[in-house]
Image (tube, rainbow, N blue to C red):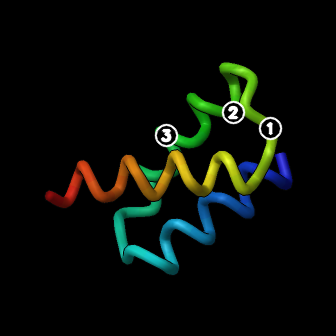
Amino acid sequence: MDALKTAVDAVVVLTGCDRDMVTRFIRGQYLSGVRDPKRLTFKGLQFAAEASG
């Protein structure tokens, strides 16, 4: 769960996106087996870019 928290914090700081939205997305990735914080952050940033654009 530290990986999840680290990724959420990084994406929110870097993008300013809604924390709840990012948390739901990254939690889904985490539960599907992605455990690396760097990978979760990268996927979260991609998601945030698509959501805002």
Q: CA distance from mark 3 to mark 1?
A: 15 Å
Say which mark, if any, is on residue 7.
Answer: none
Quarter of the figure with the N terminus: top right
Say which mark, if any, is on residue 35.
Answer: 1
Q: CA distance from mark 2 to mark 3?
A: 10 Å
Mark closer to the chain start, 2 or 1: 2
SS label for mark 3: helix
Under mark 1, the amino acid is: Arg
Under mark 3, the amino acid is: Arg
Relative vertical location of residue 14 with respect to residue 21 in this rendering, above or below: below
Residue 51, horizontal then vertical, whole percent: 23, 51
Q: Are marks 2 and 1 in contact (CB under 8 Å)?
A: yes
SS label for mark 2: helix
Q: Are marks 2 and 3 in contact (CB under 8 Å)?
A: no
Label 2 belongs to which residue? 30
SS label for mark 1: loop
Q: Residue extending furthest right?
A: 2
Mark closer to the chain start, 3 or 1: 3
Front-lying residue, 39 or 11: 39
Q: CA distance from mark 2 to mark 1?
A: 6 Å
Residue, x 45% and y 58% (percent of image)?
45
Mark closer to the chain start, 2 or 3: 3
Residue, x 72% and y 56% (percent of image)?
38
Query: Can you tell which of label 3 and label 1 is closer to the viewer?
Result: 1
49 left or right, relative to 30: left
Say which mark, if any, is on residue 24.
Answer: 3
Q: Residues within 10 Å of mark 3 (few under 14, many from 20)?
A: few
